[in-house]
């Protein structure tokens, strides 16, 4: 009504947990928010793989199940969400959030197992925990359905600052043409002001994108 486009919305879910009831509740919530997204005109719903607090890692959450088995749980649940998304015209965007998806190859592996046209990656530029996060970002860029642009390549002030020019080139070269949402984090800063930080990152991304033309 106010002329503001909504790039997407999201839910908190855990598909790494061994408890089937918890996973089923995650599917239910995701499906409900797919319908909300459709009413809002949002093109994607962000979902997680897992785990969520208070569980700290996917091995604990899964009861030390094998990675391949956990990936199958996730893929089955994500496929169910994607089927619902297809009905309502909303893409299910799987974010590399949490320790199960900390590299590009892990992200690709899960999505290939889902194997559904209405499920794709949401690329969080600050959550590929590798020696060269830009390589992981470049791997995912051609497949990305949405993004979270971060000011650092991690969730700490000790993380390297994002090279927005390099990032913009990767996104352009990957063929992405959608929204580029920005997310900033306090990261322990007492003087953190999201309005200031978002404006700073927005200006840096706009400058980097302008230089591509």
Image: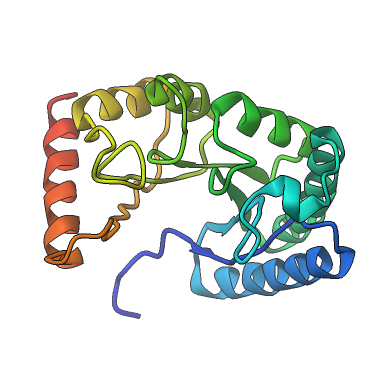
The image quarter in which residue 109 lies: top right
Residue 69 rendering spot, x and y as whole percentages: 87, 39
Q: Nearer the viewer, residue 63 or 111?
A: 63
| Residue at x 27% of width, y 40% of height | 152
Residue found farthest to the bottom? 1
Which quadrant: the N terminus? Answer: bottom left
Image side of residue 183 versus residue 60, left or right: left
Q: How many marks?
A: 0
Q: Depth check: 90 or 129 in front?
A: 129
Locate residue 72: give its quadrant.
top right
Q: Residue at x 55, y 29 (%)?
A: 103
Q: Where is the C terminus found, in terms of image quarters?
A: top left
For residue 5, above or below residue 32 = above
Q: In the rendering, at what x and y percent does residue 4 appear?
A: 31, 69
- Where is 145 relative to 195, above or below? above
| Residue 128 visible here | yes
Rendered view: 56 above or below 177: below
The residue sitting at 50% across, 26% down in the picture is 142
């Amino acid at each position: 009504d106010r002329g503001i486009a909504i790039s997407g919305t999201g839910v908190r879910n855990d598909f790494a947990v061994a408890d089937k009831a918890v996973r089923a509740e995650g599917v239910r919530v995701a499906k409900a928010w797919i319908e909300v997204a459709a009413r809002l005109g949002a093109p994607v719903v962000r979902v997680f793989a897992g785990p969520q607090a208070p569980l700290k890692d996917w091995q604990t959450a899964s009861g030390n199940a094998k990675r391949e088995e956990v990936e199958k749980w996730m893929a089955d649940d994500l496929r169910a969400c994607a089927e619902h998304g297809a009905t309502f015209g909303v893409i299910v965007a799987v974010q590399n959030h949490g320790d199960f998806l900390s590299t590009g190859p892990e992200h690709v592996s899960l999505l290939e197992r889902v194997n559904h046209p209405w499920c794709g990656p949401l690329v969080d530029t600050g959550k590929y925990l590798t020696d060269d996060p830009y390589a992981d970002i470049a791997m995912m860029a051609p497949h990305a359905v949405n993004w979270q642009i971060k000011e650092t390549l991690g969730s700490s002030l000790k993380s390297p600052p994002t090279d927005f020019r390099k990032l913009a080139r990767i996104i352009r070269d990957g063929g992405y043409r959608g929204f580029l949402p920005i997310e900033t984090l306090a990261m322990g800063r007492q003087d953190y002001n999201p309005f200031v930080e978002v404006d700073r990152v927005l200006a840096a991304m706009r400058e980097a994108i302008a230089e591509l033309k």
